[in-house]
């Protein structure tokens, strides 16, 4: 929100608060954190290596490799395979379960909506279980592309928000001094020191106004000879009299009447 005041009759001062930068900082942190969470949770590859003993007992080594750790579990006497279907979502999700003589365990930690992958993996494992002539089996379920892709996109978006909030300078204060025919624009970010640019009123080419249809917010802009716009966003409570006072002050200061 911009606050526009007239400290005296020859000076207009417009100040922005830091609330928008703080909101961007919080949003960027949350999106970045969620992106990292997605990579940690989904960027995993699961591998199952099975051997058949001469007594027709299937023993396997289950391994799940993620970003931070690798988990391994021995599987003794694999007897069957089950498909778990979760239909509580917009579209069904699937997961394979390895059934052993004592208990069962999921082949993959996360569900997938790819029925073809489930059918392919399930077909390979079931064929190995039922065909005693097969002595070895290796299957892999790789979801790293999804974890790194989706998590990376979210992290980049979040980091861009953090950059804008912390490092990218934005207009913090704009002062129009009619007496000295000078415009001062102060730029500030949350962690960098402030800097100020100065312009001469004679460099103002035009004073324009624009009202946004979607929210009714109005902006008054100074178009400089360089093509740059210096914009003042009027407070929501500003009435026509306030708008005319501000626009008239800018036009008289820039001698555009």
Image (spheres, rainbow, N blue to C red):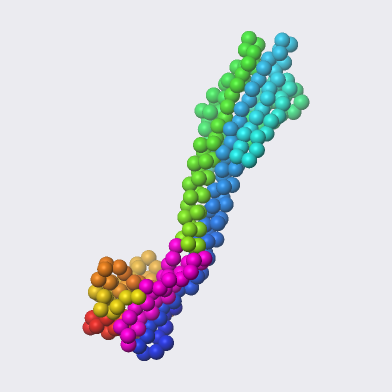
* Residue found 39% across the figure and 76% down from its top: 174
* Residue found 58% across the figure and 20% down from its top: 124
Q: Magenta region, mostly helix, strand or loop?
A: strand
Which quarter shows the N terminus?
Answer: bottom left
* Residue found 37% across the figure and 85% down from its top: 11
Is residue 193 on the magenta stretch?
Answer: yes
**Of residues 154 and 130, which is closer to you in this image?**
154
Asked whether the viewer can see residue 242, the reply is no
* Residue found 68% across the figure and 25% down from its top: 61
Asked whether the viewer can see residue 224, the reply is yes
Relative to 47, residue 19 above or below? below
Percent of width and height locating residue 104:
71, 29
Left or right position of 153 against 36:
left
Relative to 16, residue 12 above or below? below
| Rendering quarter of residue 75 | top right
Is residue 220 on the magenta stretch?
Answer: no
**Number of numbered discs visible in the structure rendering:** 0
**Of residues 119 and 208, which is closer to you in this image?**
208
Residue segment shown in magenta: 168-197
Percent of width and height locating residue 131:
63, 12
Which quarter shows the C terminus?
Answer: bottom left
Check the image and name the residue furthest to the left: 257
**Of residues 70 and 113, which is closer to you in this image?**
70
Percent of width and height locating residue 73:
71, 29
**Of residues 257 and 89, which is closer to you in this image?**
257
Left or right position of 58 against 159:
right
Check the image and name the residue furthest to the bottom: 9
| Rendering quarter of residue 98 | top right
């Amino acid at each position: 929100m911009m606050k526009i005041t007239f400290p005296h009759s020859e000076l207009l001062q417009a100040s922005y608060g830091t609330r928008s930068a703080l909101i961007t900082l919080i949003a960027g942190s949350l999106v970045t954190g969620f992106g990292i969470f997605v990579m940690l949770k989904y960027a995993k590859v699961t591998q199952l290596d099975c051997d058949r003993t001469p007594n027709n007992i299937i023993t396997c080594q289950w391994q799940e490799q993620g970003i931070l750790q690798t988990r391994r579990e021995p599987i003794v006497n694999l007897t069957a395979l089950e498909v778990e279907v979760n239909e509580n979502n917009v579209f069904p999700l699937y997961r394979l379960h390895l059934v052993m003589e004592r208990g069962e365990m999921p082949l993959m930690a996360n569900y997938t909506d790819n029925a073809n992958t489930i059918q392919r993996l399930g077909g390979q494992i079931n064929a190995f279980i039922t065909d005693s002539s097969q002595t070895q089996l290796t299957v892999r379920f790789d979801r790293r592309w999804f974890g790194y892709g989706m998590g990376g996109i979210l992290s980049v978006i979040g980091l861009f928000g953090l950059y804008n909030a912390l490092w990218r300078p934005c207009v913090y204060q704009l002062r129009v001094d009619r007496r000295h025919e000078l415009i001062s624009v102060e730029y500030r970010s949350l962690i960098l020191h402030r800097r100020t640019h100065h312009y001469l009123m004679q460099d103002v080419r035009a004073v324009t106004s624009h009202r946004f249809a979607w929210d009714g917010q109005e902006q008054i802009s100074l178009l400089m000879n360089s093509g740059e716009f210096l914009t003042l966003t009027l407070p929501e409570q500003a009435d026509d009299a306030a708008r005319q006072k501000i626009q008239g002050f800018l036009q008289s200061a820039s001698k555009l009447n």
